[in-house]
Image (spheres, helix red, strand yellow):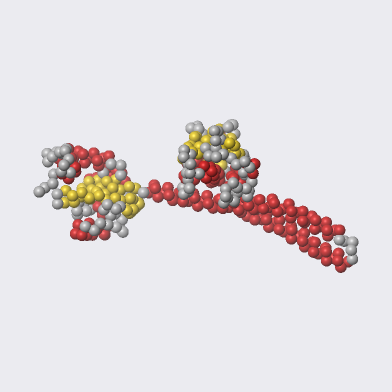
Amino acid sequence: MTQSPTDDAFGTNSPAYFDASDAGALQTLLSTILASVPDAMIVIDESGRIVAFSAAAEAMFGYQAEDVRGKNVSCLMTDADRPHHDEYIGTYLKTGRRRIIGIGRVVKARLADNREIPVDLKIGEAKIGEHRLFTGYIRDLSEQQRAEHRLREMQAELTNFSRLSVVGTMASAMAHELNQPLTAVANYLEASRDLLQTPDENSVAMAQDALDGAAKQSVRAGRIIRRLRDYVSRGEISTRVVSLPPLVADAVMLAQSGPKAHARIIKALDPNLPDVMADPVQIQQVLVNLIRNADEAIGPRPNTAIEIRIHSRTDAEIVVEVADNGPGLPADREHLFRPFSSTKEMGMGFGLAICQTIVEAHGGEIWARENSPHGAVFGFTLPLAPPNTQT
């Protein structure tokens, strides 16, 4: 008994939307589907020949439907998959053993210009009487993979910069803390050497040698610390004209890529936002640090949000603020930007110190204040790009 289109599409107990005389209506329906389905759709028969090729497939592969209809679908495959396709179909028809049907996988597809792109392939099966049709739904993954690759590159760059910034800030802090006592030791030792010039010749000579050596070693220690600081520091920043909206979008994506992101992020940007002069990687690092700090402070609470506000304050600078509705600032807030000072249980206290170093290197200032009605706001300024460089 031949199965009617009504039985195949809707089931034997469904209303008779179509009957054998509705071939034209079915053809119209199929044409509409082929023209409107968002992903590329290709229908093949049991021999692997293409019987339908959607408009989205035309756009993706660069072929017109009439160019490929009737050809074996292997013409759209790479050399790695082409030799095995007909074998897969034959094996399935004989044994019922599925390789992709109903499962899906990521494969490579060959376009009309011979380029190869990664695609997500899902295959469905329909039985028409004694014959089968296979429908492939294909989604181009090129942009997704480019975005993932770009995200990995940005994460690696920011991780490397963060590591260097931590070491640089630590070296600067050590140099500041140790140079003062080391200089004092050098001064005391030199004074002692002079005071001991009056005793007998042997003791004076020995004291002079020892004290002179101590003084030289103290000075040498200070030079080593300064050399370490100079080695790990990035030196003068390299600024250029930067548009903030895409930079903010990248920073939000990076901040949310971590496993502990909780709050939703709202971007409140002035639509006429002017460009700034900045090192984009460094300012991105500041934003990522501030967003992650806000998210960690908020924690897994209901109705949490982080708002990024950017607006012009004067003709020469712009204000960037990261505001949250969390518990607010700690009582000991005057030490927020000091190295080795952290409110986190496992924190090292370098994040905000790094942010301050970066912002001040750009000629800006950074601050923290309470948010209304509750929460915290961390803000900083950046210099505007000259008028003749605005995009």
Furthest residue in direction left, as rendered: 1
Q: Position of residue 331 (x, y in %)?
A: 62, 41
Quarter of the image where one finds residue 389: top right
For the point 30% across and 44% down, the residue is 39
On the rendered structure, is 198 left or right of 275? right
For the point 83% across and 56% down, the residue is 191
Number of marks drawn? 0
For the point 27% across and 57% down, the residue is 99
Compared to residue 105, the image places residue 17 above or below, namely above
Q: Position of residue 23 (x, y in %)?
A: 14, 40
Q: Position of residue 365 (x, y in %)?
A: 62, 39
For the point 79% across and 55% down, the residue is 187
Q: Position of residue 67 (x, y in %)?
A: 24, 47
On the rendered structure, is 23 left or right of 350? left
**Residue 210 appears in the rendering:** yes
Furthest residue in direction bottom, as rendered: 202
- The residue closer to the viewer here, 387 or 327, is 327
Quarter of the image where one finds residue 85: bottom left
On the rendered structure, is 366 left or right of 180? left
